[in-house]
């Protein structure tokens, strides 16, 4: 049967959803990444380059805790978005409950273990004789409240996937502001040591978590605590954390990459090399403001479309992310390639070795961020569509190549070996995505998907009549009657002739025996009065309208299944 493809409205919905996610994510990242930047600037100005190098020494500890945060936060958030796309509200609540409990418990256990074994850990992290005191003081203060850092990190993922990116942004902003205030007053007003910057980090995170609690006032939230023993038996931890494993593997590999780099830099250059690494890490933090804002928006959108089994929508999400990501990141990269010294100004670098080496290092790593952007988008996409294994393989490739080249180039280019290795590893991952995963080939707009019919425009009686006539070609007689009586007619009756409402109407043949009909419209609130999902809803309801918020738009969807298969 001939397909009808007119996806202008759907592209508009995706664009608005991206704006909705990117702006809050970017603002949250600005304040969130400014906080460690201010940590570094304050410590460098007050205590010198040796104390600054302690941040590079301790940074792998952050990545270990990030592993917990992304397993519980990203994994749980993607699961919630998929459950929302499939209309399984109670299941989403059970996922949220288990994810939060597991995340908090794992963070506390790891913190206690790190405190007990802090001295051998610092040796393992390549702390030098000069900066060990600073590193231990900072790390101890950090570990005491690290559970709040993990919960804030994980909570931002979950809120974003539960259609509340603005609150995720507010929590990140509060965390950053509190952190910066404590840094400045603690070091320059109360004359405290490096420990106060760690306290600012964890106390700021605690304040961010308190902001997140406002989310529980929303009536239409998917996140809710459901303490159901029977539900937990049916819901395995592995199922919740699995979507977060690619990102978790990334952080694990970063740990070994940083350790390899610190080993090379501390051995061949000493504390000056670790100071270089601290500046480069702040460069990556700045780039992450853009990269994370773009790539994190991929997850709720892709997971929701995946829940609908809407392959055409998935392709639109991927194309939009790559296009807008390159447009936003390129100016930063270009400025650092032309004049890298502007980044060094913030850190009051006095060490002659650092002043000589850093400009070249900054150029290499800034160029590498373009590849990091593309790879991060692809990883988040694969994690959202049950392709975690492909994403995991990409991290293994990246980690092995980066560690190998770091050690290989150490004797030839001791100052820049880790940065050239980063560039080579990310290029290798791009090639893997291109030739093995075919991530670029399906960017082409074509009709080789399960999508049978898509159109859109501003809703009116005549437009809806056109949808009704078209639906007859793709649905059985009973399905057509159900769509008209339960979806199209109630929507038409709810329209206000004074208000323009942009819509899209989609028919998807998910597999041989299952179809779905999706009506999406651009509105902040349900206009039909049929938003009556209950907490008891736990499975798809075939032939019944399921209403929910789909990112920026509202969604009404009906699933059909052949009688013999029900």
Image (tube, rainbow, N blue to C red):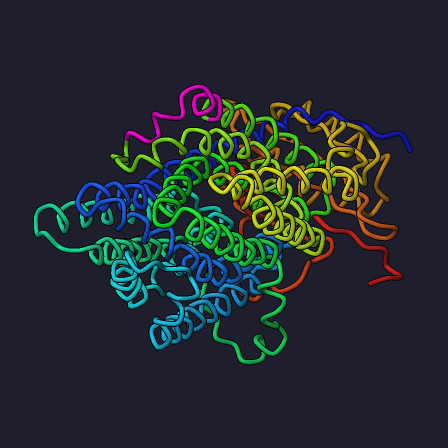
> x and y percent of residue 79 in the render?
59, 58
Q: Nearer the viewer, residue 547 or 28?
A: 28
Query: Which residue occupies 37% across, 65% down?
Result: 122
Give the vertical position of 389 relative to 103 (above or below).
above
Most extreme residue toward the right is 1
Number of labels in the image equals: 0
Could one spot residue 307 in this view of the protein? no
Q: Is residue 207 left or right of residue 256?
A: left
Q: Nearer the viewer, residue 184 or 107?
A: 184
Give the vertical position of 488 relative to 104 (above or below).
above
Query: Which residue occupies 57% across, 52% down?
Result: 81
Could one spot residue 498 in this view of the protein? yes
> x and y percent of residue 526 in the render?
51, 41
Q: Is residue 143 left or right of residue 446?
A: left
Instruction: Classify the position of the N terminus by image quarter.
Output: top right
Q: Is residue 103 left or right of residue 184?
A: right
Q: Nearer the viewer, residue 403 or 218?
A: 403
Where residue 446 sits, quadrant-wise, is: top right
Instruction: Classify the position of the C terminus by image quarter.
Output: bottom right
Would you say the magenta stretch is mainly helix, strand or loop? helix
Most extreme residue toward the top is 338
Find the magenta span and give its range: 333-345
> x and y percent of residue 155 in the render?
42, 56
Q: Is residue 12 magenta?
A: no
> x and y percent of residue 97 in the render?
48, 68
Q: Nearer the viewer, residue 528 or 149?
A: 149
């Amino acid at each position: 049967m001939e397909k009808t493809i007119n996806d202008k409205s759907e592209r508009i919905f995706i664009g608005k959803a991206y704006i909705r996610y990117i702006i809050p994510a970017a603002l949250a990242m600005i304040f969130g990444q400014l906080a460690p930047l201010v940590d570094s600037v304050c410590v460098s100005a007050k205590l010198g380059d040796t104390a600054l190098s302690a941040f590079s020494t301790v940074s792998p500890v952050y990545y270990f805790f990030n592993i917990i945060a992304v397993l519980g936060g990203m994994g749980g958030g993607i699961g919630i978005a998929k459950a929302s796309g499939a209309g399984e509200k109670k299941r989403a609540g059970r996922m949220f409950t288990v994810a939060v409990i597991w995340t908090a418990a794992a963070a506390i256990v790891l913190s206690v273990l790190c405190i007990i074994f802090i001295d051998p850990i610092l040796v393992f992290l390549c702390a030098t004789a000069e900066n060990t005191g600073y590193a231990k003081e900072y790390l101890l203060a950090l570990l005491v409240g690290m559970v709040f850092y993990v919960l804030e990190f994980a909570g931002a993922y979950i809120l974003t996937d539960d259609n509340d990116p603005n609150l995720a942004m507010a929590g990140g902003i509060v965390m950053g502001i509190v952190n910066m205030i404590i840094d400045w007053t603690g070091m320059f007003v109360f004359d405290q040591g490096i420990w106060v910057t760690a306290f600012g980090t964890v106390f700021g995170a605690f304040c961010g978590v308190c902001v997140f609690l406002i989310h529980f006032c929303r009536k239409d939230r998917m996140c809710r605590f459901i303490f159901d023993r029977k539900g937990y038996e049916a819901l395995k931890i592995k199922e919740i954390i699995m979507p977060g494993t690619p990102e978790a593997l990334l952080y694990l590999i970063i740990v070994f990459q940083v350790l390899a780099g610190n080993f090379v830099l501390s051995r061949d250059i000493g504390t000056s090399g670790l100071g270089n690494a601290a500046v480069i890490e702040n460069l990556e933090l700045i780039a992450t403001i853009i990269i994370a804002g773009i790539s994190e928006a991929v997850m709720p959108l892709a997971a929701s479309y995946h829940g609908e089994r809407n392959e055409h929508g998935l392709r639109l999400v991927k194309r939009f992310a790559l296009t807008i990501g390159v447009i936003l990141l390129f100016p930063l990269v270009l400025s650092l390639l032309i004049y890298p010294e502007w980044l060094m100004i913030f850190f009051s670098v006095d060490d002659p070795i650092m002043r000589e080496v850093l400009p070249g290092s900054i150029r290499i790593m800034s160029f590498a961020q373009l590849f990091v952007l593309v790879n991060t988008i692809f990883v988040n996409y694969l994690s959202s569509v049950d392709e975690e294994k492909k994403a995991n393989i990409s991290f293994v490739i990246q980690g092995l190549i980066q560690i190998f080249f770091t050690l290989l180039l150490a004797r030839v280019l001791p100052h820049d070996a880790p940065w050239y290795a980063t560039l080579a590893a990310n290029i290798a991952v791009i090639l893997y995505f291109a030739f093995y995963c075919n991530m670029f080939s399906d960017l082409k707009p074509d009709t080789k998907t399960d999508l049978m019919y898509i159109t859109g425009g501003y809703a009116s009686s005549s437009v809806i009549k056109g949808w009704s006539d078209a639906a007859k070609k793709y649905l059985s007689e009973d399905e057509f009657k159900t769509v008209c009586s339960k979806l199209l007619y109630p929507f038409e009756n709810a329209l206000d002739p004074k208000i323009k409402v942009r819509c899209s109407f989609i028919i998807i043949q998910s597999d041989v025996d299952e179809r779905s009909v999706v009506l999406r419209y651009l509105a902040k609130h349900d206009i039909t009065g049929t938003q009556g999902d209950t907490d008891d809803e736990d499975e798809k309801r075939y032939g019944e309208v399921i209403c929910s918020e789909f990112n920026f738009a509202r969604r009404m969807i009906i699933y059909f299944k052949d009688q013999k298969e029900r």
